[in-house]
Image (tube, rainbow, N blue to C red):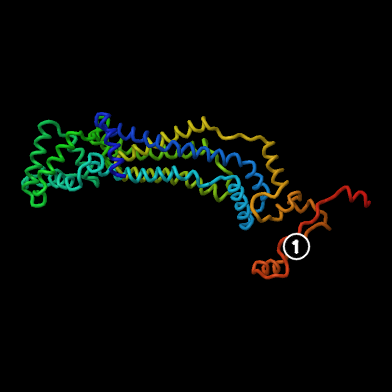
Amino acid sequence: MYKFFGTILGFFSNICGGSYFLGLLLFAIMIKLILLPFGIKQQKNAIRQAKMKPKEEAIRKKYKGRNDQKTQQKMQNEIMEMYQAEGYNPAGGCLPMLVQLVIIMLLYQVIIYPLRHVVGMDASLVKALTDFSTAAKESGGLGTVFTGRYTEISLLGELAKLKDTALTEFVEGFKAFAEASETYSANASTFVTSLNSALAKGLPNFDLFGMENFLAGVPSFKTAFKSFAGFMLFLIPILNFGTSFASMKLTRKFTYQPMQNEQTNRSMKLMDWFGPLMSLWIAFIAPAALGLYWIFNTVFGVLQQFILYKAMPLPVFTEEDYKAAEAELKGKAPYGKEQSFAEAMPERSLYLEDFDEDEMPAPVTEEEEDDDDDGTEGHSSVIEPAKPKDSGSKKKNK
């Protein structure tokens, strides 16, 4: 997969005159187009879930005010049974996010090893070129000192700067170095042939807006205010955080958000911060090229979601729709094989004040409840439903 992504990224860079920046831009657009069917499926899934909103709200209303763990679990089970009966999969929207995460991980390797994955050089040739560049001049090397963790990106940046005579001198110097080296002498001619072939195809350019080798740079607090390039590098993680945070908020606006309990809402708010903070951290430790791709991907993702939202709008419900769903829930046994007390007697009120004293169900003692939890027989902890009021019959008796 590294080779596949690298080849595509190299192709886009070449058709853009060697610009790695524009290559990343086209690559991000291509990825979004490939994932578009998943986005459409995700939107359809959201519409299917949104259509169940009145029924879901009716179920939640039935359990309103009963916040004990057992009741809340029962409510969630009933909602999940409704989802299953309606053919809805709550995890159906996770696949696009997982695919995006995998692409980011693969692209990270492609970006930090561009000579291997984008240019197509063999790993042994890359090592030989690195040794030649960093070897002392007395040993036939160039004496170059690469700073930072991403040596291969820096090496590509140095090669991309070489033109005409300087490039010819580099190849001849490398040939002499490889032939004189015990490690590389056996493969010297092969290395030179592969190097000339790669150079003939063209190398991607990591420069941006006149800033030399900018896309290979890593943001740092130390260099943020020492140069314009350093400041621009520092802005990339900030832009990553800003676009990711805005994306989370806008995506919630353009997609259906089901009703959640207080604990779930707190978790969702934490996720609103976790994603942007993660992008901020990654952009601070990775080359600028990866941070820029992340920004492109986020912006295009929001644009795609907005277009799908307009083309496939979510359903809008009236008060009558919610009343109809509540009436339907009360009028028949809902989803699942087992019926709860409220499901078995849907016409009954859930509030005790609606019953007369002689209609009140007998309370269950703590001892009886404990025995029932232990699985002992002899009684049931299920409260037998009292008969609903019949105002007409009472008037006759009077």
With respect to residue 206, does 130 lie above or below? below
Point out residue 178 in the picture as x, y percentages from the top left corner.
9, 46
Q: Secondary structure at mark 1?
A: loop
Residue 4 quadrant: top left
The answer to whether residue 343 is left or right of residue 203 is right
Q: Is the residue marked by circle 1 packed among few (<14), some (14-19), or many (20+) residues within 10 Å? A: few
The answer to whether residue 260 is left or right of residue 188 is right
Point out residue 190 in the picture as x, y percentages from the top left corner.
12, 44
Label 1 belongs to which residue? 363
Q: Is residue 64 visible?
A: no
Q: Is residue 345 visible?
A: yes
With respect to residue 215, does 387 lie above or below? below
Q: Quadrant of the N terminus?
A: top left
Residue 88 quadrant: top right
The answer to whether residue 176 is left or right of residue 305 is left
Point out residue 380 in the picture as x, y percentages from the top left corner.
72, 65
| Total residue callouts | 1
The answer to whether residue 88 is left or right of residue 348 is left
Looking at numbered disc 1 in the image, what kind of residue is underneath it? Pro
Point out residue 91 in the picture as x, y percentages from the top left corner.
50, 47
